[in-house]
Image: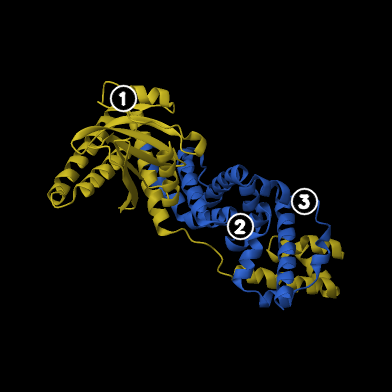
């Protein structure tokens, strides 16, 4: 075997991927040729450095949890698509869970400030919308479909923005119930994350600055503008969500 | 097999390989957040197509999906990187990189090494990561990257040649 062939096969030799005949030929050449055997030593040292570098990344624990959760959700969806009664069962179960959660949470609520209480309701609304697979009553990415849909269902008309170009496509809208009144919930998406925007009329025209609350790993933004209360909630990364909030406030 | 036990079967076969999935995604995207998104998306995709899994090599099967997911993402987000850097024919400097560098390998630390690996074109990077960090055989890498074994071999040789050159330059700068 000559130097050129040796160079070509050296890595395979190092990786133990050559057949016995090939190995033998390489070894014979390495004994005869100083240059190639020096090259071999260098290559071997490099390979050892990479092997022993500890550069293998490990999956973070919270990613593991997230994936398990997502898989379970996916498995449930697949099942419920097969049999209708299961879907009813799932809906009833999540309703029961929501009711139970409310019962547990209710005693604590009295002591909290009004905003805090609303924040809890907003978060519960967000989680419920994902849990029961009930994101939108009117699934549409067209604001001219979503906005008129609220006519006659609410005593106000919520502002609906088209932010698809900025990477936040509209998924749809639905009715929700927050702060003892029916409100508009608008759903946007960013990659795999959903954003719920809750809107309802404020008691006065007074503007309030943007408040941020973190709760159970979710971020909530809240402000009042143009006589409307806005609450935005998502598990999206905070900076991304802030960008979304800025876009909404400009709109 | 009933639909009922798809999830437990999937969890048992595929979940143990999450570190490998994350590792390759992390090296291909070169950041944590996107790597996490890639792995999650890959797992959901794998679950969806789990019926197509033959049951032979779960790790290679999963890594194929992760790789494809990452490349789709790379094309969308880092298109230029994929197009310009990779050309099998432009490496006339290979012979020059042949210089023995046993000394070099002793002096490098893992941060330097990580930077050098990150600087490799994606196809070279994945070959090194799959072989040296994940311990896949050439045949498995060929399966994951959907190329012949011969291509795996030449990619690895070129990748290591480049690594050696990069590291030698680095050490010279340091000295």
Residue B158 lies, in percent from the top left, at 74, 59
Gap between marks 1 and 3 measured at Cα: 59 Å
- Residue at (70%, 66%) from the top-left corner? A14
Gap between marks 1 and 2 measured at Cα: 54 Å
Residue A195 lies, in percent from the top left, at 38, 40
Q: Identify residue for label 1.
A: A150
Disc 1: which chain?
A: A
Q: Nearer the viewer, residue B145 or A203?
A: A203
- B148 relative to A200 in the view: left or right: right
Gap between marks 3 and 2 measured at Cα: 19 Å
Element at label 1: loop
- Residue at (35%, 50%) from the top-left corner? A219
Q: Which chain is blue?
A: B
Q: Which mark is residue B88?
A: 3
Element at label 2: helix
Say few, some or many: other residues with alpha carbon within 10 Å of mark 3 (under 14 / 14 to 19 / 20 or more).
few
Residue B89 lies, in percent from the top left, at 81, 51
Disc 3: which chain?
A: B
The answer, for residue A19, to whether it is visible in the render is: no
- B125 relative to A141 in the view: left or right: right
For the residues tagged 1 and 2, is the chain the same?
no
Q: Answer with mark 3 or mark 2, whichever residue precedes in sequence.
A: 3
Position of residue A138 relative to residue B52, above or below, is: above
Say few, some or many: other residues with alpha carbon within 10 Å of mark 1 (under 14 / 14 to 19 / 20 or more).
some
Q: Kindly report which numbered mark, 1 or 3, lies closer to the viewer in this rendering.
A: 1
Q: Kindly report which numbered mark, 3 or 2, lies closer to the viewer in this rendering.
A: 3
- Among the 4 quarters of the image, the one containing residue A24: bottom right
- B19 relative to A124 in the view: left or right: right
Q: Nearer the viewer, residue B115 or A212?
A: A212
């Amino acid at each position: 075997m000559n130097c050129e062939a040796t160079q070509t096969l050296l890595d395979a030799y190092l990786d133990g991927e050559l057949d016995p005949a090939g190995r033998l030929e390489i070894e014979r050449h390495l004994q005869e040729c100083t240059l190639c055997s020096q090259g071999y030593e260098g290559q071997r040292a490099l390979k050892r450095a990479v092997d022993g570098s500890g550069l293998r990344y490990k999956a973070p624990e919270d990613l593991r949890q997230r994936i398990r959760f997502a898989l379970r959700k996916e498995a449930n969806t697949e099942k419920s698509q097969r049999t209708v009664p299961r879907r009813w069962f799932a809906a009833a179960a999540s309703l029961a869970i929501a009711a139970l959660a409310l019962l547990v949470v209710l005693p604590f609520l009295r002591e909290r400030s009004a905003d805090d209480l609303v924040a809890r309701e907003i978060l519960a609304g967000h989680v419920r919308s994902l849990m029961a697979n009930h994101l939108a009553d009117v699934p549409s990415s067209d604001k001219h479909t979503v906005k008129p849909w609220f006519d006659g269902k609410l005593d106000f008309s919520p502002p609906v923005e088209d932010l698809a170009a900025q990477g936040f496509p509209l998924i749809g809208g639905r009715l929700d119930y927050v702060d003892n009144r029916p409100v508009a919930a608008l759903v946007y998406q960013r990659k795999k994350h959903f954003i719920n925007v809750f809107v309802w009329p404020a008691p006065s025209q007074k503007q309030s600055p943007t408040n941020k609350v973190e709760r159970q790993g979710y971020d909530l933004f809240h402000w009042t503008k143009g006589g409307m209360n806005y609450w935005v909630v998502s598990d999206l990364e905070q900076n991304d969500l802030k960008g979304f909030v800025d876009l909404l406030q400009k709109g | 097999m009933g639909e009922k036990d798809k999830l437990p079967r999937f969890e048992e076969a595929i979940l143990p390989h999450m570190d490998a999935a994350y590792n390759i995604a992390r090296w291909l995207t070169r950041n944590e957040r996107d790597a996490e998104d890639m792995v999650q998306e890959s797992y959901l995709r794998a679950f969806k197509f789990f019926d197509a899994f033959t049951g032979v090599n779960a790790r290679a099967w999963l890594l194929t999906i992760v790789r494809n997911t990452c490349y789709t993402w790379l094309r969308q987000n880092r298109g230029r990187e994929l197009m310009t850097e990779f050309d099998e024919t432009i490496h006339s400097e290979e012979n020059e990189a042949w210089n023995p560098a046993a000394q070099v390998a002793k002096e490098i630390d893992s941060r330097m090494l990580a930077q050098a690996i990150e600087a490799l074109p994606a196809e070279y990077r994945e070959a090194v990561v799959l072989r040296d960090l994940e311990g896949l055989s050439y045949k498995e890498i060929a399966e994951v990257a959907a190329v012949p074994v011969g291509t795996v071999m030449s990619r690895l040789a070129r990748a290591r040649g480049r690594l050696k050159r990069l590291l030698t330059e680095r050490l010279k700068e340091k000295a």
